[in-house]
């Protein structure tokens, strides 16, 4: 949600931290702040500002020298966005500075206790209790002071701490919120996301929950919160620094939509086995005998990833004939679910850090379930917590709204479904057919992306609508759900998604000329049923935009997409509607990459 970046070395730290914050702004963006130490005295100097990183930048004085610093971009949880609630938080003597991602669950109790001891709080945040606890510790080392504070804290955290009396180090700790160390030459960095590190180093150490680290300019060490050394070794990040840039596009969303053909090519690469008409997914940790023993599959994810999971469940049922369904992880974890030993659970997440998904995985593992991950970010918490899984290889996704990751996740599910199907009852001929379909996807995605000017015109036409209805049937329904989410996230137009089959059970009452319907109409065995739904809408003077494989007579407009295999059509049918949402939002002057109230990675409840 929020972003942390820190540096210790020889460089002038403020510009480096501000640049890091810019790269993290997509995680949360209602306020930001930075602390650096004075090179001579070690005293801490701080600037904070409500608003975007550029507002903070405007406040940083010209003379703000320092070679060690920590900075933060915030997405408010405790306390409204304001200068004073922004991080870092300093103690009254300006000795200790803390930046924090996560939530201190017992903050109210700790605050009351500290206030009873005479501590005066400057902000309304939960984080400030951490600062006071560290400042009041009588321990001799900064590490011990932080450890003492963490002992009384309940909740989640990724923190970075500076102390004026221990100017040669930054101490960091992780519990449920990512902390990644960047290992440089005579300089060390820390961040909550590799996006802020990659311009400086590709050597990283990802802390585990319950782990801490001390960073000095030429050295780092990792240890548990109880003090045991953990000797982490750096790993090389595969993503290029350039993949975090806008690459000549006006927005990250546009860049990421346009990357979908090559991203799909990447998730397929090296995995297809023509000899056996199947695919190999190296990291599943599920042998053929175990796969045959799976009686049911339950997919868990949130938002767009949940929608990808719905399409995934359909693919698994169709190709592998294993009963499968998807559920929002945020609901699943609160309903005391029955965990069945013959069910395979699949957690799906772009970031691999979504707290609701992670908590569901942890609960499942505690109950002895086998959990696979379908994740984009390598080494992320969900990827590490799962028993095995597959990466979706979409590359970094910076825009808050997910596009290329959605597409790649669905393709990853198609691969998994094919793999399971070929271990079970899917014939060689059907395996071949699906592989041929998968191979066609990148070129067909390019064809759809080339339709952008036409889709832009349509979007301008529909941009005045107050509300929109999205319908689809069976394979098309999750496509409708995702398209409606995309539209509301970035245009703020109210949108509803319904199974086309449910129209006459209620939502038909809404249909009138002012409520346009976007209908997913694949050329499959349900074509005539879908056409009947279009008739029903037209009979009530509803406007219709169809996404179909051929022109639809009853529709006012049809976006004609290339046909693939019936099972794989949902992968393609959502892409024109990403472009549609994009151009609708653009026509309405929205901030596409940073929609209001949202953050890229929801690492809190
Ligand atoms: O990183 P995740 O895939 O776990 O994120 C889950 C959702 O928060 C995310 O998909 C959200 O719905 C996006 N804003 C979709 O565009």
Image (tube, rainbow, N blue to C red):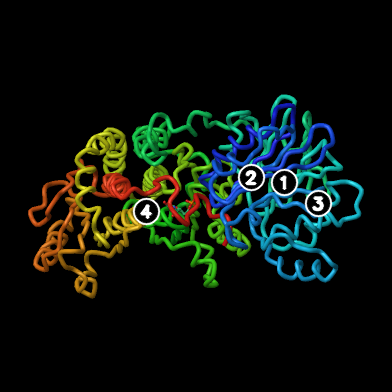
Could you classify mark 1 by the number of other residues whose Cα lies within 10 Å: few (under 14), some (14-19), or many (20 or more)?
A: many
Disc on the earlier residue, 2 or 1: 2
Q: Is mark 3 within 8 Å of ligand 1?
A: no
Image marks 4 and 1: residues in contact by CB distance under 8 Å: no
Observer-nearest of 192 and 68: 68
Count of marks placed on residues:
4
Residue at position x 61%, y 62% in the image: 79
Image marks 3 and 2: residues in contact by CB distance under 8 Å: no
Which corner quadrant of the image does residue 453 belong to? top left
Disc on the earlier residue, 3 or 1: 3
Question: CA–CA distance between discs 4 and 2?
Answer: 39 Å
Could you classify mark 3 by the number of other residues whose Cα lies within 10 Å: few (under 14), some (14-19), or many (20 or more)?
A: many
Question: CA–CA distance between discs 4 and 1?
Answer: 43 Å
- Tell me, yes or no, if residue 423 can be seen here: no
Observer-nearest of 234 and 431: 234
Residue under label 1, please give it.
160
Which corner quadrant of the image does residue 132 belong to? bottom right
Instruction: Residue 384: give x, y in percent of width and height.
Output: 60, 47
Could you classify mark 2 by the number of other residues whose Cα lies within 10 Å: few (under 14), some (14-19), or many (20 or more)?
A: many
Disc on the earlier residue, 4 or 1: 1
The mark found on residue 146 in the picture is 3
Residue at position x 18%, y 46% in the image: 559
Instruction: Residue 32: give x, y in percent of width and height.
Output: 60, 47
Residue under label 2, please give it.
4
Residue under label 4, please give it.
316
């Amino acid at each position: 949600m929020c972003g942390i970046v820190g540096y210790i070395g020889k460089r002038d730290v403020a510009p480096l931290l501000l640049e890091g914050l810019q790269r993290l702004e997509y995680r949360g963006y209602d306020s930001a702040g930075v602390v650096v130490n004075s090179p001579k005295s070690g005293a801490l100097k701080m600037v904070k500002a409500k608003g975007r990183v550029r507002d903070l930048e405007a406040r940083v004085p010209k003379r703000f020298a320092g070679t060690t610093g920590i900075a933060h971009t915030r997405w408010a949880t405790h306390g409204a966005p304001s200068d004073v609630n922004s991080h870092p938080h300093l103690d009254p003597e300006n000795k200790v500075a803390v930046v924090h991602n996560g939530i201190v669950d017992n903050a109210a109790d700790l605050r009351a206790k500290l206030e009873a001891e005479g501590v005066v709080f400057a902000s309304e945040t939960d984080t400030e209790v951490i600062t006071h606890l560290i400042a009041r510790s009588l321990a001799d080392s900064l590490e011990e002071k932080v450890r003492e504070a963490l002992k009384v804290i309940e909740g989640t955290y990724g923190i970075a701490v500076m102390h004026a009396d221990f100017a040669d180090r930054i101490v960091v700790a992780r519990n449920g919120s990512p902390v990644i160390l960047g290992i440089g030459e005579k300089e060390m960095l820390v961040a909550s996301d590799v996006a802020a590190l990659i311009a400086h180093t590709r050597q990283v150490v990802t802390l585990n929950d319950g782990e801490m680290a001390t960073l000095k300019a030429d050295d780092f060490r990792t240890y548990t919160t109880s003090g045991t050394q953990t000797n982490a070794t750096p790993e090389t990040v595969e993503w290029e620094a350039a993949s975090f840039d806008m690459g000549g596009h006006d927005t990250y969303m546009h860049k990421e939509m346009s990357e979908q053909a090559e991203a799909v090519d990447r998730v397929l690469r090296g995995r297809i086995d023509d000899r056996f008409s199947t695919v190999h997914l190296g990291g599943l940790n599920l042998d053929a005998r175990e796969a045959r023993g799976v009686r049911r599959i339950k997919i868990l994810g949130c938002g767009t990833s949940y929608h990808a999971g719905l399409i995934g469940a359909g693919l698994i049922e169709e190709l592998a004939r294993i009963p499968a369904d998807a559920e929002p992880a945020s609901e699943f974890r609160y309903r005391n679910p029955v965990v069945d030993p013959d069910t395979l659970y699949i957690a799906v997440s772009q970031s691999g850090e979504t707290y609701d998904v992670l908590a569901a995985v942890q609960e499942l593992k505690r109950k002895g379930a086998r959990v696979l991950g379908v994740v984009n970010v390598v080494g992320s918490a969900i990827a590490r917590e799962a028993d095995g899984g597959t990466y979706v290889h979409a590359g970094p996704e910076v825009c808050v709204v997910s596009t290329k990751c959605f597409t790649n996740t669905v393709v990853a599910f198609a691969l998994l479904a094919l793999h399971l199907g070929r271990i079970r009852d899917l014939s060689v001929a059907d395996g071949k057919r699906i592989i041929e379909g998968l191979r066609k996807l990148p070129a067909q995605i390019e064809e759809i992306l080339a339709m952008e000017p036409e889709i832009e015109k349509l979007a301008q036409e529909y941009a005045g609508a107050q509300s929109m209805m999205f319908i689809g049937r069976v394979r098309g329904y999750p496509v409708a759900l995702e398209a409606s989410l995309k539209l509301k996230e970035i245009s703020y137009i109210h949108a509803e998604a319904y199974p086309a089959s449910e129209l006459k059970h209620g939502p038909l009452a809404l249909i009138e000329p002012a409520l346009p319907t976007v209908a997913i109409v694949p050329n499959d065995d349900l074509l005539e049923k879908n056409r009947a739904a279009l008739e029903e809408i037209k009979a009530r003077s509803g406007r219709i935009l169809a996404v179909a494989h051929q022109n639809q007579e009853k529709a006012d407009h049809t976006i004609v997409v290339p046909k693939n295999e019936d099972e794989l059509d949902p992968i393609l049918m959502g892409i024109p509607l990403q472009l549609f949402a994009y151009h609708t939002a653009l026509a309405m002057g929205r901030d596409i990459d940073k929609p209001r109230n949202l953050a890229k990675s929801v690492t809190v409840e």
